[in-house]
Amino acid sequence: MAVLDAPAPPVPTAPPIVTRPRPAAPAAPLRARRRSTPRDPFVDVVRAMGTVGVVLLHWLMAEAAWDGRTLHVGNALGHGAGWLVTWLQPLALLFFAAGASAGYQRGTTATVGRGWAGAVVARLRAIARPVGAFAGAWALAVAALLALGVPDDAVWRMARMAPQLLWFLGVWVVLMALTPLFRAAWERWRWGALGAAVALPLAVDALRFGLPNDVTAGLAWANVLLAWAAPYLAGVAYAAERGAPHRPAHPRGPRGGRLLLAAGAVAAVAGMAVLVAVGPYPPSMIGMPGDKISNLGPPTAPVVLHAVAQVCLVLLFRASLVRRAGTAAGQRVVGALARRSMTVYLWHLTAMFAVVGVALLGLGQRLPVAWGADWWASRPVWFAAFLLTLLGLVRLFGRFEDRPRR
């Protein structure tokens, strides 16, 4: 072993020409030799797609009116065929990427000496800084806006909407803490574990609508965790298989596996269409003003099938996604989002609120009617304003996402 080799003798002033090999250098200590969590470009691509998708979907929703006393907030996707856009909501991709990242970390020696609980605590500390900065900045902003005379109704309406994004972090923390159980379930039951993860929220939904409301009043909220556990477990399973020594060498996978993924995506989308057509579910995959129920609060059966379809599709096109992300432009975008995904997620609604607030309250303008000609023509201008504001916020608050130096 290298650690037992004798040190090399001192080199003389005029060494003779020798052919014997140099002794190996002593091995690094155990702490330095621990492997870090692998970086899978596919996981970064999926996370970037999910982050961009959430941002664009929320920016498309911008619809508000100010009558001088009350801020009326609507949803531009609630008009006409706007519900079709909601079928692209990408929350399942974020949970899949989170599961894969945690699965890779669980499968390495990165947690030796502190256990998985220590790894979860470390992640909580990492997100506490950007979330704390977000909460503190909003508290100061509310106080400043009220002091400047901005109408109370508008200020408090925005202040109530901005923190709604934090629900994702709460669910993610719970799922991350359960990662060892998810990995053990996959290693023991394989596809049975994934099947159970999909079937369980579907069963909860069947009970919710099949039994009287007074019996299932609180049962439906179990799907806030169960529905997103399915794509999270899929991510854990993906990481476990990619890290296993028997994984297939071909990046596109076996042909039978690709056919299975394609069939799964088609079947899931068909199931969504049937449930929306014959069931009690609204066509939108997010909550809409005027709908009796929301497909997201709590998640319903169509959302579970929607998650299955999205996971199948990204796995089906994995090689193509990684190849496109490998270009110079793709690497810049994916790399930037990998470093600042939390900041972008936390602040993209604030960027939209700031631009819309200045237009309505500061300049006295009206937003164009959703899906009209003016609405379409003005989308590039509004999106550019949202993006520039978001870039400024990311530049200002992005450093809270960096690991503090010791």
Image (spheres, helix red, strand yellow):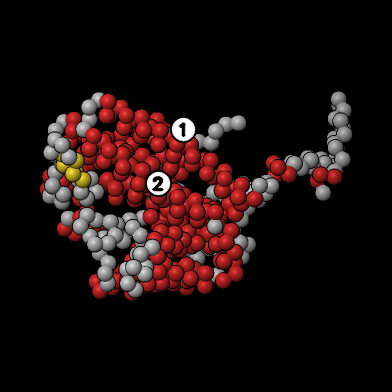
Q: Is residue 293 above or below residue 31?
A: below
Q: Which mark is residue 32?
A: none
Residue at left offset 43%, top offset 34%? 133
Between the C-alphas of marks 2 and 1, the distance is 19 Å
Q: Position of residue 339 (x, y in %)?
A: 46, 40
Residue at left offset 50%, top offset 62%? 233
Residue at left offset 27%, top offset 29%? 146
Q: Position of residue 143 (x, y in %)?
A: 32, 29
Q: Left or right: 364 with respect to 351?
A: left
Q: Which residue is mark 1?
A: 399
Q: Quadrant of the C terminus?
A: top right
Q: Left or right: 186 with respect to 379?
A: right
**What SS does tag 2 mark?**
helix
Identify which amino acid the numbered label 1 is placed on. Answer: Arg
Image quadrant in which you'd find residue 156: top left
Q: Which of the two residues, 15 or 359, is positioned nearer the viewer here?
A: 359
Q: Few, some or many C-alpha atoms within 10 Å of disc 2 (few <14, some 14-19, many ≥20)?
A: few
Identify which amino acid the numbered label 2 is placed on. Answer: Leu
Residue at left offset 54%, top offset 49%? 39
Q: Which residue is mark 2?
A: 166
Image quadrant in which you'd find residue 92: bottom left
Q: Earlier in the sequence, mark 2 or mark 1?
A: 2
Q: Nearer the viewer, mark 2 or mark 1?
A: 2
Q: Which of the two residues, 91 or 266, is positioned nearer the viewer here?
A: 91
**What SS does tag 1 mark?**
helix
Q: Position of residue 288 (x, y in %)?
A: 24, 56
Q: Is residue 255 above or below residue 110?
A: below
